[in-house]
Image: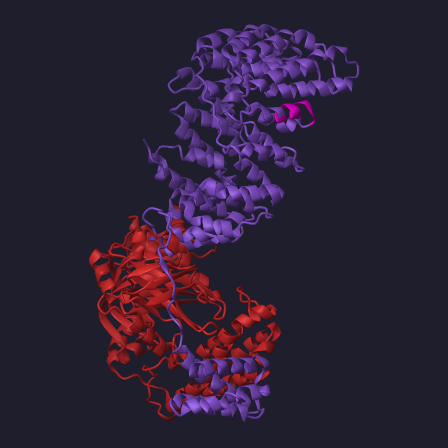
Chain colours: A purple, B red
Amino acid sequence: MSIAVLTQVHQEIRRIAIAGSVVAPGDFRLKKYLAPLEQAGAKAPIFAKVAEAVKSVVESNERTSADAVLELTALVNAILYTQGETGLAGEFQKIETTNLGTPSTQTSARMLKPLLEALTTTGSGRMELIREAHERGLFRDFRLVKPALAALDDVYGEIGDFVGEKILPLYGKAILPELRAKFDLKGRAGHPRRLKLMHVLDPEATREVVKQALDAGSKEVRVVAVECLGSHPDDLAYLLEQSSAKAQEVRQAAYWALSAIHDDAAVAVLQKVATGKELRLAAAALRRCKHPNILQFIIAETEKEVGGLAKIKDKKVVSTQISRAQTLVTCLFRRKEKEAEDFFLRLFAQSEEIAKIKGATSSGSDLNSQVVSMLASGTQKMQQTLVDSHGALSPEDLGSCVQAARRGLPAAQVYAVFSPYLTAKVDEKKKHRDPAWAKREAVCNAIDDEYYYPHWGDEDDEPESGRGYEPERLPTLDPRWLDLAVALQRFDLLRCTIRPGHADANAFLQKAFDESIKKSKNLYDCHDVVSCMFAAAHPGVVEAVFAMFDKHFKKLDDMGYWFSDLITKLPKSEISRLEAIVPKLSENVANQLLESIHQLRERKDA
Amino acid sequence: MISIDDGYVDSAAPNSDAAKNGRGLVLKNKFAKLHISPDESILFGECQGSGKEPYRCSSDFLRPEQPTHRCNCPSRQFPCKHCLGLMYAYAQKKKFIAADVPEVLQAKRDKVVARVEKKVAEADKPKQINKSALAKKINAQLEGIGFLQKLTQDLVRLGIGNMNAKLAKDVEEQAKQLGNSYLPGAQAALHQYTKFFAGEDGKFTEKTSAQKEMVYSEALDQLGRLQVLAKQGKAYLQRRLEDAELKPETESSIAAWLGHAWQLRELKDAGLVENNVELVQLAFNSHDDVARQEYVDTGIWISLATGKIRLTQNFRPYKAAKFIKSDDSFLQVAQVKELCVYPGDVNPRIRWEGMLSRPLQPNDLVKMRGFGQGDFQAVVKHVKTTLKGPLADKQPIFALNFKRLGQVADAYVVEDAKGERLVLTDVGMSEEPPSCHLLSLLPPSAFEGQTLVARFRHDLDTRKLQIKPLSIVTPTSIIRLTL
């Protein structure tokens, strides 16, 4: 009872302090507690003391009121501090935990602090820090859970994606409540990532949220919601509905999801799309769909488009139809079924007639090139057919033919078929005007291109590109190519075919280096040759690197990442020699070289 | 003989950039001269900088536990990159030529030796007090106290509800007068009040009525505290004015509240020293104190001998943060020869000058768990008794041995063997990051029969005394919940 009065007094004094102590003199609301306090004071002197302090406040004037209010505040607060409630009645329940393994909280604050800042602030350089911390396993420290969850909304999308895909799944279902609490159906940026993550962690429990997202989510959230569908029997109905959504991105996601469902209704949607204006939008989905009806449908649709071309006079219409046929053809990329094989071989057989069709922007030859590239990535029979026709191909299509041969034929046969193009007599002055010259260059370029940009092994090329692609490993080239490269003095061919221990190649490289260092105006001018010398395990490569330094260090203001890369390939025994160069360099380059030396020192040699 | 390695130099560096730069100087061959004294007690050399003249730097190991670094470069980092480079060069076995110590340097060394000797000699002598200077200072402080009292009363007259961003800014300006009156502690206490009207970034912005409502009780409590500080401070200073021989008070924390910067010598003189102490860090946090305009690194330590929980605090003012080495979490056992303890309540501040370290053993954890208090009722009584002191630490830390940790509805609770419960919360304790949410990530074994290190807080609005979990000591490890 008395404590209740004290609480009331505290409320009143708080009110007076908020308004200002000038209102305290004669305050009737405070005054009314005087009597009960005096009464309680008879039993406990502390209440008498409070009563006295209350009286001082009430009887104060403008000058003394502030002091009186503070005195009363200090006294009442001191008592209330001793009356703090503890405990909580109710049924005791165990905490539902997620086993993260043994929690590792032994990371030092000096290491965690920059990471926390990287996750919770903005600015450059954060992605590297986060990626490195992930690789070092620092995110096993569960104190980073909350900041990592917040980083889903990072303004830099790459961080949000990385955290959502690589880091947060480490914590398992423990983060689901937080994800659910923060998730906003109408949100953008981090919210689609939240939905995706919730689905990854617990698809069953997230199903209801996904349904809500489909009904009322923002465009971005709906796209993710559609991506979450496909594995449940009820999903088809939702996907069919979303395939006619207003937002193009949502429709595209729905097509993609439908392409994985073997159902007539799903196929019907894709077929309908393939006949309309959204063919390009659905191309990836059509390519992914392995339903036999789709294959037959695309073949029929393409043949219909191609078959009617000859009768059309309007070049614009011709262009449009060829364009559609090209897109339809790409939908059968890497299809190995007999029907697809026959279809492509039929089309290839008609290439002469098709080449005669001229459109405004696209012509029959464009379609032919598309067919050639499909043959190159098709069945062995398709590839063989293409290689067999190599003599009839244009220089532009010969490259695809080389690529087909490298995948379908033994290395020796590839050499036998295509090396004559390199030794053929050509008119160097005419260049492209001489078909022999153009074909020689096409063969060289096809080999060179795949050395630098290997084709991607795309099992399922998703609409938004880029997930989990691995470069395709091609069979090694016949060793005679290197001899040919040396004989023809072609550096572009040599660097694709180089191997250690080839004396003539080494001599060629040495000569190439001597010439390039002589003419070079900066470090980069020698880069290709020296890189190739490393690949050849050339005995002069170390001296070549130091010669580059000797010639260019005075004017050097930036080493370039590619040169740093070369430094890290040197033998470790050269570290002291490199360190001796450091004092000669500008501050910036010296720091770059020191970094490379550090990497070289840390390199783990087999 | 100087015995240092790269690791030693790394740890001597104020930050990782300084270490990297020092190492770079060696690799860039920037040291034109590298010398060592014939008795191998000092390294000195010349390092080429951006100017014409090289920097002359030295690392003096005459006192190995406390080496002296000197350099004529303008850097305020200590040791500077040149001294670090010099040590790296020695650690990496670069060639150091034996040479006599230059006269100028030798003179400085002699001064240090003399200073150390003098310090030792003076340690036993009673400290001479310049009475007139002290009286002048105390008078200035009394004047400042008068100003604090007047300002506090003006703020109450004005009314907390009428405070706005502009007024709070004005008060901060006026608070500088307290700093000029040798009352930095009182100034910080006043900033604690104005902080209620600032945003998280320390900038004064207009708050909504709802936001203001949330701070009124705390703000009023702080005003009450300022009033008590002014009164007790005045009485204390008057006592010191009357008796010039009177030492700063060690029985209470009033001296620290006024801003007395305790020197280790004073603490030793006052007998506030413990010898050969082993300490284990229970928690660590580094926070940005916008009121004080500085970063504060706080370590929470337990003594393996007594179980007392005390704090290390490293204050790094914004303006000098770059030049002050930040503290870090410490995961081993610190062996301190001479531990100085500041006057204070439950968790006083501690400091030491040099220490050794050893790995944490399971036996240490057993000891620490043994110091936890298993009777929550007794702890709560202790806390309440402490809290009623107006100048007491309002968020004391205790180690609690609990029977089980779990949930009642949505709240986390910890329960002792008698069934007494304490509620866990993050509310109102923003120095450390939130920690309650981490409980759901712990293994179930952490919830039964462990020791919880927790910070208590009484909420003036809800009138609840609750705790914030800082770490859990298990038989195998210390699970840190904060940073």
Camera-side residue: B446 or B110? B446
Q: Is residue B97 magenta?
A: no
Residue B18 visible somewhere in the drawing = no
Rendered view: B388 above or below A53: above
In which quadrant of the rendered image does the C terminus of chain A lie? top left
Residue at 65% in and 7% down = A350
The magenta region covers A269-277
Residue furthest toward the right? A314
Quadrant in which residue B377 is drawn: bottom left
Number of residue marks: 0
Residue furthest toward the left? B363
Residue at 54% in and 91% down = A58
Q: Position of residue B34 (x, y in %)?
A: 33, 53
A457 relative position to B64: left or right: right
Rendered view: B195 above or below A378: below
Quadrant in which residue A475 is drawn: top left
Q: Is residue A273 magenta?
A: yes
